[in-house]
Image (tube, helix red, strand yellow):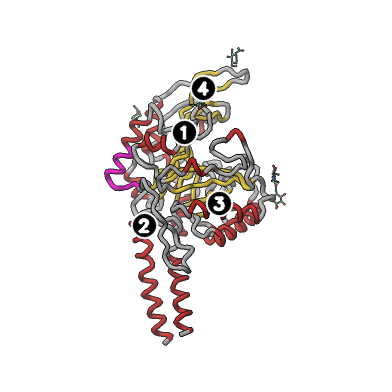
Amino acid sequence: MRRHFLALTLTLTVAVFVAGIKNQVSDGKIVFGVWFDGTTDISGNDTTARVNDRLGFNAGAFHSWQMIPPLPAPQFAPLQNADGTVNFDLYNEGTNAAVFLTVYPQGLYNVTDTDILNLAAQCNKISALGRNVFVRFAPEMNGDWFVYGNNATAFIPLWKNFYTLMSNNAPQVAIVWSPNYNGPDSNEPYDPYWPGAAYVDWVGLSLYWKGFVADWPWQVNKAAPSNYVAQIIDAQGPEGGSVSFYKTYAVAYNKPFVISETGAAFNENIVNTNGSLTPISPGPGHVNLTMSFWDSFLFNQEFLTTYPLFKMVFSFELYKVEDSVQRDFRALTDPTLSPFVAGLQTLDNMGLISWANSAVQSSETTTSTSTASTQSSTSSQKSTANMIQLPIYTLLFMLVVMLK
Ligand SMILES: *[C@@H]1O[C@H](CO)[C@@H](O)[C@H](O)[C@H]1NC(C)=O
Ligand SMILES: *[C@@H]1O[C@H](CO)[C@@H](O)[C@H](O)[C@H]1NC(C)=O
Ligand SMILES: *[C@@H]1O[C@H](CO)[C@@H](O)[C@H](O)[C@H]1NC(C)=O
Ligand SMILES: *[C@@H]1O[C@H](CO)[C@@H](O)[C@H](O)[C@H]1NC(C)=O
Ligand SMILES: *[C@@H]1O[C@H](CO)[C@@H](O)[C@H](O)[C@H]1NC(C)=O
């Protein structure tokens, strides 16, 4: 009897572990997600409902962000509450879109266990509504532009503690390790920051088309090379570094890969030191430039076939000043909205996109011991998990028989 119990416990544990790619997306599908601007800036006053209206589909995921510990920042209302946590009401628009929460540490040394437990509790509340939750912790840690960046020695223990506490207290949340893409000069290497496969659920990258490396600081507009994103993620050309992120981290450890933030920058104006604006030549034009980038991966059959672990992407729907240039990263506004949505429609016709359902499904619970299993938002995701569990159950049934 005891042996049976032991074997059963083992069965469930192993099944959960093996089936345990958190928030797995069905084979052959991609989740199209949006980082929208809820502030009152130029690209602002956007909402999830407005995004879905423009798309004509329900985006599969929405990006949001906060600091850890939360830092009140009135300029980010209504995206954030007065206490600096994400205003989830803005994301609770009646679909079951996944919630992709970027969490920026305030520093390398002052994120406490209590802060992490508070975040876990916050995520559990969102999961309880039947939403898949992702947390992208300390993104772009391999660059020197964030206060927590550019220090692998201090980063690794911070990450491991974060992952351990989150996975113990909010086991259904997928933790995303997401550095900045490393270019040919190798200023932002990945490997010093890799905490090990046991501490990562999904791998991701920030990557953008702003121009060729040689054209920095990007005060010109040029179309992207037709394989630009493969150059970046898989060392397939001069714009990328020498290490294939996709093979080294996604393929080697069978981790789903998300392009966590992305877009093509249409470089509009140089902001001069006296505040005046100097227009930048449109080059090939806004539509051509933006679509050349998205055509290099999302709207590209060969890319999708070559990189099946590419499961999710977030379009950065913002207009912002960077390196003294006004850049429009948006795809989901004029003049690019219509060709972009046509691209999505084509993918949808081929059944390649996993959209959100318009009503939140009640979360399905499996067994009482399998708290680590994921809440699947579609029945096809559910059956993928079951398919993986089946052979394990068979195997362990044999083990039970042997123990007898
Ligand atoms: C957003 O709303 C604010 C307040 O109503 C307004 O001042 C601002 O111009 C709006 N911005 C955009 C981009 O619509
Ligand atoms: C954490 O440390 C950073 C960098 O040293 C500092 O800017 C921030 O104010 C600190 N935050 C807290 C809550 O201690
Ligand atoms: C990086 O972190 C280590 C360990 O905490 C610390 O000793 C070192 O001073 C940090 N380096 C920088 C450049 O901050
Ligand atoms: C501001 O700076 C730009 C670029 O240096 C210059 O062309 C322009 O004349 C200046 N405008 C004024 C009002 O000084
Ligand atoms: C952009 O323009 C070039 C040159 O006319 C053309 O070859 C290319 O197909 C265009 N790309 C898009 C996405 O419109």
What residue sits right under mark 1 in the picture?
A: 46
Residue situated in front as seen by the camera: 338 or 87: 87
The Cα atoms of the two marked residues, 1 and 2, are separated by 30 Å
Q: 265 left or right of 274?
A: left
**Residue extending furthest toward the bottom:** 404
Segment tinted magenta in the rendering = 343-353
User: Does the rendering let one see residue 248?
Assistant: no
Q: Secondary structure at mark 2?
A: helix
Judge: label 2 CB < 8 Å from ligand 5. no
Mark whose residue sits in front, 2 or 4: 2
Q: Secondary structure at mark 1?
A: loop
What residue sits right under mark 4 in the picture?
A: 269
Residue situated in front as seen by the camera: 41 or 244: 41
Task: Determine contact: label 1, label 2, CB under 8 Å.
Answer: no
> Could you tell which of marks 1 and 2 lies nearer the N-terminus?
1
Task: Please state the horizontal and vertical placement of residue 274, each as a whole percent of the image.
Answer: 62, 18
Task: Please state the horizontal and vertical placement of residue 131, each as a whole percent of the image.
Answer: 45, 51
Residue situated in front as seen by the camera: 186 or 373: 373
Residue drawn at x 54%, y 44% as measured from the top left = 180
> Could you tell which of marks 3 and 4 lies nearer the N-terminus?
3
Does the stretch in magenta take in 3?
no
Mark whose residue sits in front, 2 or 3: 3
Q: What type is the residue that disc 1 sits on?
A: Asp
Residue drawn at x 34%, y 46% as measured from the top left = 353
What residue sits right under mark 3 in the picture?
A: 122
Task: Please state the horizontal and vertical placement of residue 354, each as a whole percent of the image.
Answer: 35, 48
Mark whose residue sits in front, 1 or 4: 1
Q: Secondary structure at mark 4?
A: strand
Mark whose residue sits in front, 3 or 4: 3
